[in-house]
C-alpha cells in the first residue's frame, strides 16, 4: 500500500492530501502539522472571509524569476478548476468584482469543508508534530518529528514560507528542501507594510487616502499601484503598499537605497492641482493656509503637507507666493519617503523568493533531484499580488502534486 506523507497542514497541504486520496483510494495519506490545528493561515485570509481565488487569473498577477513556470501551473489548474474543486466539497461562492469568496463570508466554512473531506477520506492528521528531519531511504523516505518517525513512499513539502510564523510558517520547509539537495533564492517579506525613516507623516497616523505609490531604487521606478494608502505611526500600509512591498524588500536585502514616491492627488496632474489652488485663492486671501486646504485634504494631513512645503499653517493665503504653491503641488504629486525596513515576516502575508522553480517539474511539482519528493505552495519562488492569487497558487500546486504523487507507482 502506497504511503504519501504531507508535511504541512496549510492550504496547499490540505488540497494535496485530498486529491491524493481521491486519486488512489487505497493510498495511505497522512498530514504532519506542527501547530495544534490545521489550516490556521486559511482562517486569517481575506480578513477572515477567505478570498479563494480571482476571476482575473493570469501569470501577470504573480512575481517569479521563472514566469513560464507560473503560467504552466495556472494552465494546468486555474480559476475554474478551483471553483470545481470547492464545489465538490459543497462550497457555495459569491463574487465581489473579480474576487471570489465563500457565500458564508467565513474562512472557517472553507476550512471546515476541507476538514470534513479529510475525515471522509480517512486521511490521518498528526498535529503538534514538527518535522525535524527528512531523509531518503532505499524504500522511500523517513520523516523524523519531535514525536515519532514516519515512513513514506512519496513526500509533499507544503510547509509554507516564513510569513506569519505565528500561524505555522516558520521557514523550516526551506531547510528540509535544502537537505534534499535543493537551492533557493533569498526570501524576503511580501504583501507587507513599510517602515519610513523618520516619517514626516507619523502624526497623521490613521489617515486613509487614495494615492498612487511607486517603489524606487535610487531614482529608478520598479513598480507602482493605485488605491487606498494608510498612514501609520511607523510608515505606510494598505493594499497599494502591499503590492509594491516585495520590490522594496528585495532592494533592502541587497543593501540598496529604497524609497516610495507617493502621489496624494492621483486624479489630477501637477498643473491641474496648481490651477485649482490658485483659483481657490480668490475670496479666501485672509484665510490661514490650514483653513484654505480644508475640503481638499484630510484634516490631519494638511499640517504635514504644509510642513514639507515649508509653509506655516497660520500664514495668510494671500501672503503665499505662486512659486510656493507650485512647490506645494509638486510635493503633493511626488512625495519621496525613504524606506528603512519592512514590517517583518511576522506581519507579511507571503514571502518573495524561495526554492528555485527550475528544480521542480512544471507540471507535477516533483523534484528534479529526488524522485517522489514534491515541493508546493509558498516554498517556491512565486508570490502573487493581493486578491486571492496566493491562495490560488496554494490550491493549484497542492492539487497537482497530490494527483501525481498518488497516480505514480511507488518505488525507485
Image (cartoon, rainbow, N blue to C red):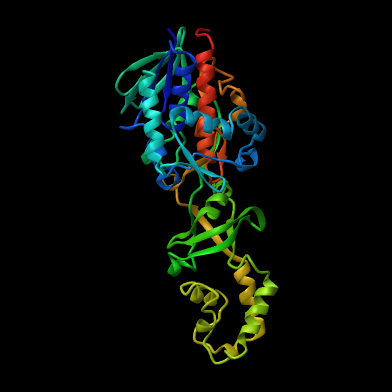
Q: Quadrant of residue 203?
A: bottom left
Q: Nearer the viewer, residue 136 or 55?
A: 55
Which residue is drawn at the image coordinates 48% and 68% (left, top)? 201
Viewport quadrant of the N terminus: top left
Q: Is residue 181 visible?
A: no
| Residue 244, x across and y down, in percent | 57, 51
Q: Nearer the viewer, residue 400 or 222?
A: 400
| Residue 149, x across and y down, in percent | 34, 16
Which residue is drawn at the image coordinates 61% and 76% (left, top)? 328
Which residue is drawn at the image coordinates 59% and 24% (left, top)? 360
In the rendered view, would you say 135 is above or below 88? above
In the rendered view, would you say 297 is above or below 290? above
Q: Nearer the viewer, residue 352 or 97?
A: 97
| Residue 158, x across and y down, in percent | 46, 28
Q: Is residue 45 visible?
A: yes
Q: Quadrant of residue 18?
A: top left
Amino acid at each position: 500500500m502506497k504511503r504519501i506523507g504531507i508535511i504541512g497542514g496549510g492550504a496547499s497541504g490540505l488540497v494535496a492530501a485530498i486529491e491524493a486520496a481521491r486519486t488512489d483510494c487505497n493510498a495511505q495519506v497522512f498530514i504532519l502539522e506542527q501547530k495544534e490545528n490545521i489550516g490556521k493561515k486559511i482562517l486569517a485570509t481575506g480578513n477572515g472571509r477567505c478570498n479563494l481565488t480571482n476571476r482575473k487569473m493570469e501569470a501577470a498577477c504573480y512575481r517569479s524569476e521563472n514566469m513560464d513556470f507560473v503560467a504552466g501551473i495556472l494552465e494546468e489548474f486555474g480559476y475554474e478548476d478551483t471553483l470545481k474543486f470547492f464545489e465538490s466539497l459543497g462550497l457555495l461562492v459569491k463574487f465581489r468584482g473579480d474576487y471570489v469568496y465563500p457565500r458564508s463570508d467565513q474562512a472557517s466554512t472553507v476550512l471546515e469543508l476541507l476538514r470534513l473531506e479529510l475525515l471522509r477520506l480517512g486521511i490521518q492528521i498528526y498535529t503538534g508534530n514538527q518535522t525535524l528531519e527528512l531523509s531518503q531511504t532505499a524504500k522511500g523516505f523517513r520523516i523524523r518529528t519531535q514525536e515519532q518517525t514516519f515512513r513514506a513512499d512519496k513526500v509533499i513539502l507544503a510547509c509554507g514560507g516564513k510569513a506569519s510564523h505565528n500561524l505555522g510558517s516558520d521557514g523550516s520547509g526551506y531547510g528540509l528542501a535544502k537537505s534534499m539537495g535543493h537551492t533557493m533564492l533569498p526570501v524576503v517579506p511580501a504583501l507587507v507594510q513599510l517602515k519610513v525613516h523618520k516619517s514626516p507623516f507619523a502624526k497623521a497616523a490613521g489617515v486613509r487616502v487614495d494615492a498612487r505609490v511607486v517603489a524606487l531604487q535610487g531614482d529608478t521606478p520598479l513598480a507602482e499601484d493605485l488605491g487606498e494608502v494608510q498612514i501609520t505611526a511607523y510608515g505606510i500600509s494598505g493594499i497599494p503598499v502591499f503590492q509594491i512591498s516585495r520590490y522594496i524588500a528585495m532592494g533592502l536585502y541587497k543593501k540598496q537605497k529604497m524609497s516610495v514616491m507617493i502621489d496624494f492627488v492621483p486624479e489630477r496632474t501637477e498643473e491641474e492641482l496648481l490651477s485649482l489652488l490658485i483659483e481657490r485663492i480668490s475670496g479666501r486671501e485672509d484665510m490661514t493656509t490650514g483653513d484654505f486646504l480644508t475640503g481638499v485634504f484630510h484634516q490631519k494631513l494638511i499640517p504635514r503637507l504644509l510642513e514639507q512645503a515649508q509653509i506655516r499653517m497660520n500664514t495668510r493665503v494671500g501672503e503665499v507666493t505662486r512659486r510656493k504653491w507650485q512647490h506645494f503641488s509638486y510635493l503633493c504629486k511626488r512625495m519621496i519617503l525613504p524606506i528603512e525596513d519592512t514590517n517583518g515576516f511576522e506581519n507579511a502575508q507571503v514571502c518573495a523568493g524561495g526554492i528555485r522553480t527550475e528544480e521542480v517539474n512544471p507540471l507535477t511539482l516533483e523534484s528534479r533531484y529526488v524522485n517522489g519528493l514534491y515541493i508546493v505552495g509558498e516554498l517556491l519562488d512565486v508570490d502573487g499580488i493581493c486578491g486571492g492569487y496566493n491562495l490560488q497558487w496554494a490550491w493549484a500546486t497542492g492539487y497537482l502534486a497530490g494527483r501525481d504523487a498518488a497516480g505514480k507507482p511507488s518505488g525507485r
